[in-house]
């Protein structure tokens, strides 16, 4: 089984986005963590596979279409997309997209044995399913210094209290990076 | 106008409680911050007045009735309770409860001029009203190392992005305390 890390960024009120998938609050990370273990590209370089929900996939495609991302931001890593759609739309520069519908335990079991470091990209519903199955091994969380008031939470779902232990924290300007490991 | 601090504790997914007002996750703070500026009683000692929403008030009363709090935990400070009820139930050891209905700007204007350090206790709806009126000067936030999946968020409401700057952060075990000041 791969080691699954939920890496994401939230507002102070625990939201992944504002209303209408607004990600403007992410601008508050601009210039933070210029190097070191929480530099976004360095964190991403540590993953060899991705899982994401259908909404996250849609938002990324919309951002590419709007010119907000120049291209698929995750390279050629295999990316499993939890979706009920029978097939996924093509995305330029995303060579290895794999639709999946079903239990997240089966999704994780599908990940090639050679892939051991999986990034759970989001969103909150898929994270809730992973947490319900106790499949989240690590959380790396960027906290933006702002409140949104509306928008999806980091985790949504019904599961027992999932406790982690804090492995590390760092600040950069007004941004905070927290790294947690599952306390099983 | 008093200086208003939103002091509260959330789960990693930004929730003030789990389903059914469950506060079991607060046990994860047990033994953390044994002294220093983020010891709960030391933070509370810095306030001379309180504001809270009707749900927070009800939950506190229920916890007193259930023996989870021995008594009203906030001493004899004047406490404004945002409620549409015409009067508030009596609470032992809470000598100065003041019901309020209306705009939070008027609530803050009612606070006696001699009171200058107001604790916004919660919950998320009232905090959303304070944020909408840009009346939150400071946030002191304890982050518990756990996810809940359901429950009310730290802030709920419709307001422009409210950015703060990080004044301080500290860890104690797996708990984190963050202190933010409003960047106006």
Image (cartoon, coloured by chain):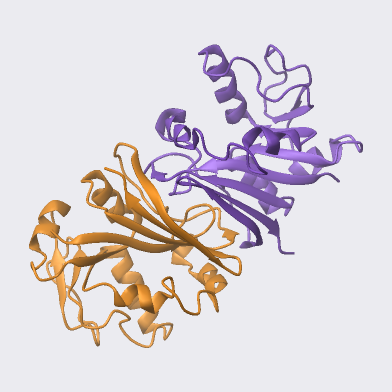
Chain colours: A purple, B orange
Relative vertical location of residue B70 with respect to residue B26 in this rendering, above or below: below
Does residue A165 appear left or right of residue A135 in this picture?
A: left
- Please state which of residues B92 and A147 is positioned toward the viewer in this rendering: A147
Task: Evaluate whether residue B103 shows in this view.
Answer: no
If the image is split into quadrants, where does the C terminus of chain B sit? top left
At a point 86% along the width and 46% down the height, the residue shown is A1
At a point 29% along the width and 61% down the height, the residue shown is B5
Res. B113 image quadrant: bottom left
Residue A140 place in picture, x, y as percent: 64, 47
Residue A17 place in picture, x, y as percent: 47, 36
Does residue A69 appear left or right of residue A107 in this picture?
A: left
Residue B174 place in picture, x, y as percent: 60, 66
Residue lying at the far front of the rendered structure:
A35
- Please state which of residues A5 and B21 is positioned toward the viewer in this rendering: A5
Relative vertical location of residue B14 with respect to residue B99 in this rendering, above or below: above
Relative vertical location of residue B82 with respect to residue A121 in this rendering, above or below: below
Residue A175 place in picture, x, y as percent: 49, 45
């Amino acid at each position: 089984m791969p080691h699954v890390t939920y890496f994401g960024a939230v507002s102070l009120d625990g939201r992944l986005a504002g209303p209408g998938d607004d990600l403007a609050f992410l601008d508050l990370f601009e210039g933070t963590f210029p190097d070191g273990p929480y530099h976004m590209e360095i964190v991403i370089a540590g993953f060899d596979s991705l899982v994401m929900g259908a909404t996250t996939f849609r938002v990324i495609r919309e951002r590419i279409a709007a010119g907000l991302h120049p291209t698929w931001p995750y390279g050629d890593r295999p990316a499993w997309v939890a979706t009920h759609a029978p097939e996924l739309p093509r995305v330029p520069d995303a060579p290895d997209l794999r639709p999946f519908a079903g239990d997240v335990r089966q999704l994780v079991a599908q990940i090639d044995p050679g892939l051991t470091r999986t990034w759970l990209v989001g969103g909150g519903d898929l994270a809730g399913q992973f947490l319900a199955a106790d499949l989240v091994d690590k959380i790396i969380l960027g906290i933006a210094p702002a409140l949104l008031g509306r928008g999806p939470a980091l985790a949504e779902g019904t599961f027992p209290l999932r406790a982690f232990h804090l492995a590390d924290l760092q600040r950069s300007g007004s941004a905070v990076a927290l790294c947690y490991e599952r306390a099983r």
